[in-house]
Image: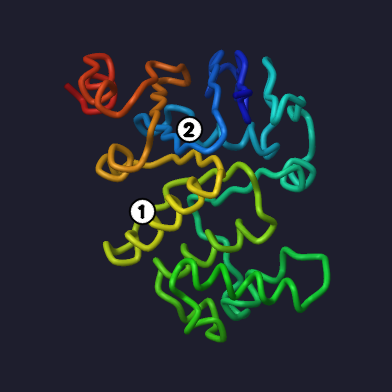
Amino acid sequence: MAPILEIDEVTKRFGGIAAVNRVSLQLEPGRIYGLIGPNGSGKTTLFNCITGVETRDEGQIRFRGHRVDGLAPHRIFHLGVGRTFQVIRVFPELTALENLLVVTTGAIEPARQRALELLRLVKLERLAGEFAGNLSYGQQKLVEFARVLMTDPDLVLLDEPAAGVNRTLLNELLDAVKRLRDAGKTVLLVEHDMKVVMGLCETVFVLDHGEKLAEGPPGLIQSDERVIEAYFGR
């Protein structure tokens, strides 16, 4: 099966520092991938390069076989790449339902039905009319996650989805991610909670100082001495 995302020797520099240094990854459709590494290892910068927030300095990024490096973020989004951010970006004075509707451009009633369906997916349908600013941190994360799905992206990038979320809400989110995978979507997540990564992801990529240190199934990554030394501090 052809990869849905190909990252080929991508480098991103800030001044004289290579935040991402010649990183290559391939993601197959319908799988859940993890991207881990110490703080400052380049994970979010790589996300930004994939989604056009940052322009890579070298290398190529291909989505469904077509180069997307150099495209504006909104063009990459409309091609079928959605993402969340480390810092929640909800509109606090809009309801949960309205937060999902803001990304749509088509007829309002089908969009409204889609939004309600997604709120049901994350078990927030009863809070559809509540202002997002009144929701808990975890609930706001679920709203942001549901909003990413409004345009039915084929590739979903999640930046630290478990951070600050209580176990009950986290389980709702993880169940929703698994249902995405079962529907044929591809998920790449950055996460520091190793229980989440090892229990959810089928393949894990490890970055350290901007370079890819290792990749493989969770069990292999957990036992890799290079990963233990770089990530777990031994």
Of residue 58 and residue 225, the one placed in the foreground of this image is: 225
Spatial CA distance of label 1 from label 2 is 15 Å
Q: Is residue 19 above or below residue 132?
A: above
Q: Quadrant of residue 99?
A: bottom right
- The amino acid type, in three-letter code, at marker 2 is Lys
Q: Label for residue 163?
A: 1
Mark 1 touches mark 2? (CB < 8 Å): no
Indicate left or right for 207 with 51 as reference.
Answer: left
Placement of the C terminus among the 4 image quadrants? top left
Q: Residue furthest left?
A: 234
Q: Earlier in the sequence, mark 1 or mark 2?
A: 2
Q: Answer with the quarter of the image where residue 222 lies.
A: top left
Frontmost residue, 204 versus 71: 204
Q: Is residue 196 above or below residue 67?
A: below
Q: Residues within 10 Å of mark 2 (few under 14, many from 20)?
A: many
Q: Amino acid at mark 1?
A: Ala
Q: Of helix, strand and loop, which one carries label 1?
A: loop
Residue 144 lies, in percent from the top left, at 54, 62
